[in-house]
Each structure stands twice: as structure tokens, then as C-alpha cells.
Image (cartoon, rainbow, N blue to C red):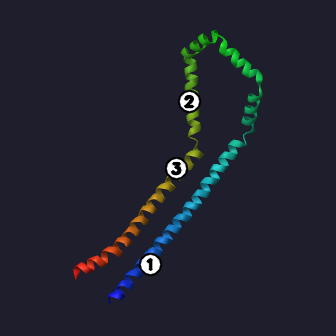
Amino acid sequence: MAIEALEIRMARLEGGYEQINERLGGIEQRLGSFEQRFTAEITSLRSEMASRTDLASLRSEMASRTDLASLRSEMASRTELTSLRSEMASRADLASLRSEMASMRSEMATRSDVTALRSEMRAADADLRKQMNAQFFWLLTFVLGSILVPILRDLAR
């Protein structure tokens, strides 16, 4: 009789482990597809940034110009530029221009496509954490049950 009860418990544990394995496999598949989507989005963003030929050509043109380097060194050596810089720092219209530039930077940082991708990633991460937490407690329940049930039966005798 005790052997049959042990076999029944083992069969239940095996069934539980199979369910856990299936659920973890489903989570793994979802995580893999999420990773593929995330990689594809990052790749497309990188290719879009790299395909901007106007920026690349401007950078290469600016780097190749030697007259700009000599102009910079000449401007750094002039003392009248220091007074001009201090005057520019005190002007109100330049401050408003700086604030406008800062708002444009923040707007670029909050583009809807990037924000949507971030929120989707956070939602998927939260869902994955919930599922993993539930799977952990299922597994913990089966392991503790397989340990505690025989001990409690022995104590009840």
C-alpha cells in the first residue's frame, strides 16, 4: 500500500514537473521572440542612423579642413574673444536660444517610436518576471510537498 502511495505521489510530481517544463518552454520561446524583435528594432535604428549621409559627409568634410584648425587656434589666442564671450553669456536672447535648444534635445530624447519600444520592453519584462515568480513558487510547492508529506505521515503514525 505504501509503495502505491509513493508511486502516485511520484506520478503527480512528474506531472507537475512536466507542466513546469512546458510553461518554462513557453516563457523561453516568448523571450526568444522578444529578443529577436528587440534586436531587429535596434538594427533598424542603427541602420537608419548610419544611412544619414548628410551627417557623415559633413563630419568628414569638417575633419578634413585644415583651415578650421588654424582658425580655432587663432581664435583661442585672441584676448578680445574673452570679453565677447562674457558679453554673450549675459544676453537674454542667447539664454532663450539655449533653452529652446534644450527643449529640442528633450523632444528628440522622447521620440514616440523609441518611447514605445521602451515601454513595450518594460511591459514584457514585468510580465516575464511575474511568470518566472509564479513558476518558482509552483516548483517550490512541489519540492517542499515531496519532502514534507512523507515526514508528516511518519509523524502521524
Tag 2 residue: 102
Which quadrant of the view contains residue 152? bottom left
Q: Nearer the viewer, mark 2 or mark 1?
A: 1
The amino acid sitting under disc 2 is Ala
Which quadrant of the view contains residue 72? top right
- Residue at the bottom extreme of this rendering: 1
Residue 149 higher or lower than 7, as above or below: above
The amino acid sitting under disc 1 is Gly
Name the residue at 69% across, 17% down: 73
Label 2: element kind? helix
Tag 3 residue: 119
Name the residue at 49% across, 71% down: 21
Tag 1 residue: 15
Whole-Å distance between the Cαs marked 3 and 1? 37 Å
Q: Is residue 10 left or right of residue 28?
A: left
Dot 2 or dot 1, earlier in sequence:
1
